[in-house]
Amino acid sequence: MEKQRIVFATANLNKLREVREIIGSAYNVVGLKDIACNDDIPETQPTLEGNSLQKAQWVKQHYGVDCFSDDTGLEVEALNGAPGVHSARYANGTHDMAANLDLLMRNMEGVTNRKARFRTVVTLLLGDECHQFEGIVNGHIALRRGGSEGFGYDPVFIPEGESRTFAEMTDEEKNAISHRGRAMRQLADFLKLHDKHS
Ligand code: IMP
């Protein structure tokens, strides 16, 4: 029997590969490129929940397909939850990751409370249903950068119970405990149950 197709509202091929590994056995997960969507999808909401929903709704409305989307933020306690929903554009509003990291480390200079967490919100639009799943990994901001794996804020984030940053771990090690891994596994469990009942 042919696998049911579901669109992941992302153009990021690394994320697509990661998620296929988690839910790919039951579903044919395709990305935005596969439905010829090159839109600059708006992310103008003040929360991860809002942005995640906005992206999924855009795809559903414009392409008429079942889909899911994700939105992630790094929330630092001493910075009142910043960069949070602005993680991608923390420094000067652009997608400049080197500048984002520099700004974060400058803002954390001399700060002793280094507690932080990554949070991902996944939104699933399936038929008329809408469901959200949250994945969190607690940890802290390192005093200095370490590692060259991963992306984004990985070189400065040390998950709880670890001494290494995410950028010092393999993909597999990171996915097993990461925010996105946790949210996506909830999505996978939901889809499995849903299939059983449909
Ligand atoms: P997005 O919602 O996945 O696009 O993530 C927003 C921003 O959060 C990205 O630009 C990254 O800077 C950061 N980010 C998201 N996921 C991760 C991660 O797994 N590690 C490090 N940084 C991340």
Image (cartoon, helix red, strand yellow):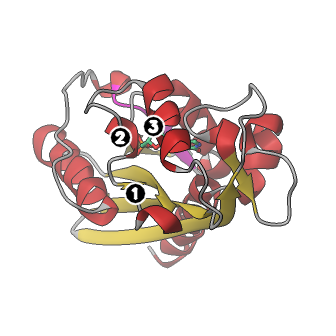
Residue range (magenta): 27-32
Q: Is residue 154 above or below residue 195?
A: above
State the residue position of label 3.
Answer: 103
What amino acid is found at the position of numbered circle 3 in the picture?
Leu
Q: Nearer the viewer, mark 3 or mark 1?
A: 3
Q: Identify the residue shown where x is 72% and y is 39%.
A: 144
What amino acid is found at the position of numbered circle 2 in the picture?
Tyr
Image coords of residue 42 (percent x, y): 16, 40
Give the mark, 2 or 3, whose residue is nearer the N terminus.
2
Which quadrant: the C terminus?
Answer: bottom left
* Residue 2 visible at all: no
State the residue position of label 1.
Answer: 82
* Tag 3 and tag 1, C-beta contact below 8 Å: no
* Tag 2 and tag 3, C-beta contact below 8 Å: yes
State the residue position of label 2.
Answer: 90
Between marks 3 and 1, how big is the CA–CA gap? Answer: 11 Å
Image coords of residue 68 (percent x, y): 37, 52
Secondary structure at badge 3 equals: helix
Q: Is residue 94 above or below residue 75?
A: above
Q: Is residue 187 above or below residue 181?
A: below
